[in-house]
Amino acid sequence: MGVFKKDDGWYIDYYVRGKRRREKAGPNKRVAKLALEKRKIEIAEGKFLDIKKNEKIKFEDFSETYLELHSRLNKKPMVVVRDVILIKNLSTHFAGKYLYNINPLMIERYKMERGKEVSPATVNRELACLKSIFNKAIEWERAEDNPVRKVKFLKENNQRLRYLEEDEIGRLLDNCDDALRNIVIVALHTGMRRGEILGLQWRDIDLNKGIIYLLETKNNEKREVHMDDLVMKTLSSMQRDPESPYVFCDKDGKPNINLRRNFETALKNSGINEFRFHDLRHTYASYLVMFGIDIRTVQVLMGHKTIEMTLRYSHLSPDHKRRAVDVFGKRMDTYWSPEIKIRSEIKSIDNCNTLISSAV
């Protein structure tokens, strides 16, 4: 901290919350020193109020700035769609509040109330988005502190595996409107993630080859998704919006972002509980395994980076180990000579006779 002179007067130099501040204090050194001492006292007593910190910026206004100047400029389309959804959920609680008024206690209450409605993973994604918003607010000098840093995220159960039974699939499709039914069919028959589906553009679809080309994925790797007949018929029958490149869009041609509410309504009307949209992806993988598709192929179809991610589904095929052993036995059987087989059979018969004699 100190004072210094410039051409137009005397200035003071000091730090607030680790950030350097400089401001014009007066026409002479004595006034500048008095101003600096006053700032020192205010900082020590915690009474220093920075103008930018108390600038009246509402959460919803800055969130829109965050989307325009950060998300849409730096993130992939599917991630932007996710940010829009997350901010919409956050706004139900924080809209109308100024950034400088949002504190850790307020966020803890949001975490508790939101946790009654959705999974811990969903709450954590929303908190992570809120944290990123405040980080940008600090970077752009619209906030002094990030209150989310003092909030502990919820513990997630990443081993959760929920998939639809056959009767549940039928009930769900019966309770979907036309637009939602098309989305659910694509999810059930391809295993694509929600962001991949909502960000899907017509240019990514080759109906002649039956392939969907995903250029933007969670793993940042290009992926080819093969379509079955139902997916191809579903996409072929859809009416395209000539003004929008997106397959699933609203009346304004933007990616459909009202999916959550419509999906939850369909689930409720179907009597399906404890189920998320992402579980449609689990359903796809689960039935692949139960239909006898080998784990390595399932890994490729799901776009999993490691086999460990796919092995969580292996228990759904109780006879997959037996089939593997049977295949191994039949293939190895061709390597044994007839003489060895005969000796093995004779020995087996002798052992049975011995057991019978002992029992008598």
Image (tube, grey):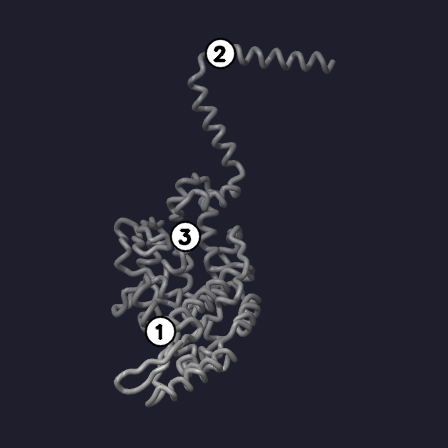
Separation of disc 1 and disc 2 at Cα? 80 Å
Give the structural element (helix, strand or loop) at label 3: loop
Query: What whole-number distance in Å separates the C-alpha atoms at marks 3 and 2?
Result: 49 Å
Residue 68 figure quarter: bottom left
Q: Secondary structure at mark 1?
A: loop
Tell which circle, 1 or 2, labels the residue nearer the N-terminal end: 1
Rendered location of residue 155, percent (x, y): 55, 58
Between the residue at mark 3 and the residue at mark 1, the CA separation in whole angstroms equals 39 Å
Q: Which residue is mark 1?
A: 140
User: Residue 92, relative to residue 218: is it above or below?
Assistant: below
* Residue 28 - label: none
Q: Amino acid at mark 3?
A: Gly
Query: In the image, which is nearer the foreground, mark 3 or mark 1?
Result: 1
Quadrant of the drawing holding the C terminus: top right
Give how far across and how far down residue 50 sits, in percent: 42, 81
Q: Amino acid at mark 2?
A: Ile
Location of mark 2 (residue)? 340
Residue 165 in sight from this viewpoint: no
Residue at the outermost front position: 30
Q: Mark 3 near mark 2, Cβ–Cβ under 8 Å?
A: no
Quarter of the image for residue 184 reads bottom left
Q: Nearer the viewer, residue 168 or 317?
A: 317
Crowdedness near tag 1: few (<14), some (14–19) or many (≥20) residues, C-alpha within 10 Å: few
Q: What amino acid type is highlighted by mark number 1?
A: Trp
Residue 267 place in picture, x, y as percent: 51, 63
Name the residue nearer the viewer: 174 or 21: 21
The residue positioned 54% from the left and 39% from the top of the image is: 318
Name the residue: 40% across, 69% down. 135
Residue at 34% across, 85% down: 24
The residue to which callout 3 is attached is: 191
Q: Is residue 249 above or below residue 298?
A: below
Sequence-wise, which precedes: disc 3 or disc 2?
3
